[in-house]
Amino acid sequence: METPRRLVVGTRGSALALVQADMVEKFLRVAYPDTEVVRNVIVTTGDRRTDVPLSDVAKVEGVLDKGVFTKELEIALENGEIDLAVHSLKDVPTVLPEGFEIASVLERAPVNDVLITKQAGGLDALKEGATVATSSVRRQKMIQYLRPDLKVIDIRGNVPTRLRKTAESSEFDATILAEAGLVRLGYDATGEMKTEAGSVFGEVIDPERFLPAAGQGAVGIEVRIGDEATAECVRKICHQPTFTRVVAEREFLRLLDGGCHTPVGVATQLFGESLLMEAIVFPEGDEAGMPMTAEISGKVCSPKVVATELFNSLSIEE
């Protein structure tokens, strides 16, 4: 198949999105030195609607399956304005609109969540009744599961903005960010981070108890189904172990009929030919109750089968 002479990469305009687009573009230029790789920055619904909580944007805007950070990129794909879209995979709806596919992923960054506080010490140093700001319902549920005394509020903004708000705000004491985003933007995720409003401090939340979102830490590349020339290009830069893991995680979320904002944590690890999966699923909304959990191991070559077995093994935690 003839290699395209030009590839247009679509991306959001946040600092992290641009770094991730740059990563994809560099891989493509190395793999296809004779192909021109250009960028088209697109404003998405999630970028535009910062006036409401992230979990409410889809309802306000009527976006299918909470695709608040993907809709406009997919419109550009459909119209031929871009050839591929670069996403933080955890922001991508579990079921894509007809005509699109995630054809490739880059090697995964750390999947941990990091608690950002005004003083060093992490979760144990937060005073009783402290307030944690996060737009993720998964993080809200999990932090209150670990520390029922804590209060949670919503926060919007990109990574640098949230760091600055944490340093300067008197309304909350901490926030939670993905280690992957911090690392990709050059921050010391487990130490002091300086902002224009002062320093904040990061500490990884115990990953054994605080499971990540499906696809967290992975950069996904979306293409049009039928555009085999572009699909072949991006598959050449795909990191297969990461792809296997995220296929399993996203299949588990699909079986739950969950979206990007469903309070679910799911983690995967590869051990030779074995795929280990574990999950925790919280009641949605304000509903109280114990979460369901499961852990299972299966064959690397059958990630969707392993995901199905994990789903069927869910039970209320004792």
Image (cartoon, helix red, strand yellow):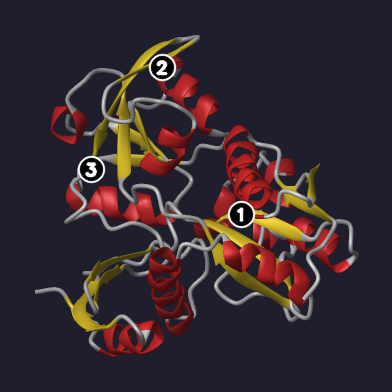
Which quarter of the figure is the C terminus placed in? bottom left
Element assignment for label 3: loop
Q: Left or right: where does residue 279 sit relative to residue 165?
A: left
On the image, which quarter does residue 171 sit in?
Answer: top left
Residue at mark 2 to residue at mark 3: CA–CA distance: 19 Å
Q: Is residue 31 visible?
A: yes
Place of residue 63 in the rendered image (x, y in percent of width and height, measured from the top left): 72, 64
State which quarter of the image contains the N terminus: bottom right
Reading the image, the residue beneath label 1 is 87
Above or below: residue 297 compared with residue 133 = below
- Point out residue 232 in the picture as x, y percentages from the top left corner: 67, 71
Residue type at numbered disc 3: Ile
Q: Which disc number belongs to residue 140?
A: none
Question: Element under label 2?
Answer: helix
Q: Is residue 170 visible?
A: no
Which residue bears the numbered disc 3?
205
Label ID, residue 167: 2
Foreground label between 3 and 1? 1
Task: Say whether disc 2 or disc 3 marks the residue closer to the N-terminus.
Answer: 2
* Residue 89 screen position, x and y as percent: 53, 59
Mark closer to the chain start, 2 or 1: 1
Residue ID at (70%, 57%): 85
Residue 138 placement: quadrant? bottom left
Q: What is the crowding at mark 3: few (fewer than 14 residues within 10 Å), some, or many (at least 20)?
A: some
